[in-house]
Amino acid sequence: MNCPIKTRNLELLVDFAAGGLNPETASALERHLAGCDACRSMAADQTAVWKALDAWEAPPVSPGFDRRLYRRIDEVARFSWWERLTRAFRRMPLSQAVPLTASAGLLLMAGLLLHRPGRIPPVASRGEVVRANQVERTLDDLELLRQFGTADSKESAHSDAM
Amino acid sequence: MGVAAAATLDLDAELMLRVKDGDAASFGVLLEKHRVPVTRFVYRLVQEQAVSEELAQEVFLRVYRSRSSYEPTAKFKTWLFRIASHLALNWLRDEKHERGQERLDDLSTDLPARQITDRRPSVEQELLYEVKLKEIRRAVAELPDKQRAAVLMHKYEEMEYTQIAKVLGCSESAVKSLLFRAYVTLRARLAHMGIT
């Protein structure tokens, strides 16, 4: 066998210390070590370090590991629903998304404030008409705001270009 | 790549493809198999148990989150340890900025329970063991990050050079060089303990 140090084949000594060589290579190296002080010394050092590292044991994994992990996975699953809901808004430019979100919030608040079940007579058909009108108005408002936002951004782009 | 093709790659990759198809039980099997090696590897890198468990959970969480885009282009374990190394090395980098070398003086606070062949060690033996262990941990902790990761995968996870190279994103010869330099440093640092 060629000298591992002279041939820069040092992983052979590392693998020897780790017990990772096949029996034939290990025997050939052992024969070489018997006549090569430098390799023998390096192999002994490496074996000593390898054995020293054996003393370092990692602590056991705590019993609640899986429970905590699955809880986090559940949270991720819930969050992904919210992601889907808000994806449409995130694609919009900020100039459109902000007024739209604000308008939707205002409409929701107004709806909550105006909705007083005690005062409104419980006529199902009327309630449905009112809600349908409200939805229509809201959609119109949102469309108007979207158009306004688009026109606004085009205008600003035009003025910027000029 | 289909399930049959992945089976030639490794069983874990096949399980991961089942997870991709919505089989939650296969994720449980993968977790059961790799929970300890991943946590142990991360623990030896960051040397703090609570942090290592948090990071190990993040590893499995990322595996779960990326299930839909998973393609078995490498061994599953290589992919897993690549995520683990990435997270742990990032944590170490951030931690270095925050705390400097302070943590190295605090290694004895997180010593694992000792398992020894002699069931009744004397106080002296126990103290000697703790001193030796602290020195080993310090010597490993002071290695450059990539060398440390390479040594831990080589020594404790018994990973091959090619696998370590894929995890660390470098060539096999670079891994051999990293390992050799790391072991030279360890020999020098641990020599005063009478190891060499």
Image: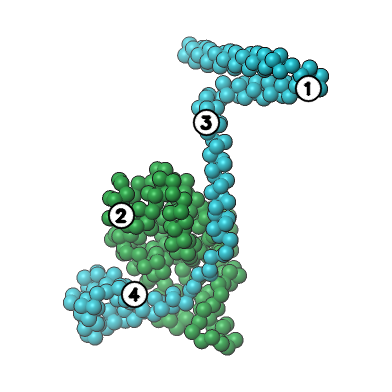
Query: Is B22 placed left or right of A122 in the picture?
Result: left
Query: Is B35 placed left or right of A1 in the picture?
Result: right
Q: Which mark is residue A18?
A: 4
Q: Which colour denotes chain A?
A: cyan
For label 1, the residue is: A116
Determine the CA span between mark 1 and mark 2: 63 Å
Say how many tags the image has: 4
How far from the left and from the top, in percent, is residue B32?
46, 61
Above or below residue B193? Residue A151 is: above
Amino acid type, residue under disc 4 in the picture: Ala
How far from the left and from the top, in percent, is residue B52?
53, 60
Amino acid type, residue under disc 2 in the picture: Ala
Q: Secondary structure at mark 3?
A: helix
Q: Residues within 10 Å of mark 3 (few under 14, many from 20)?
A: few
Amino acid type, residue under disc 1 in the picture: Arg
Determine the CA span between mark 4 and mark 3: 53 Å
Asked whether the residues under marks 1 and 2 belong to the same chain, the reply is no
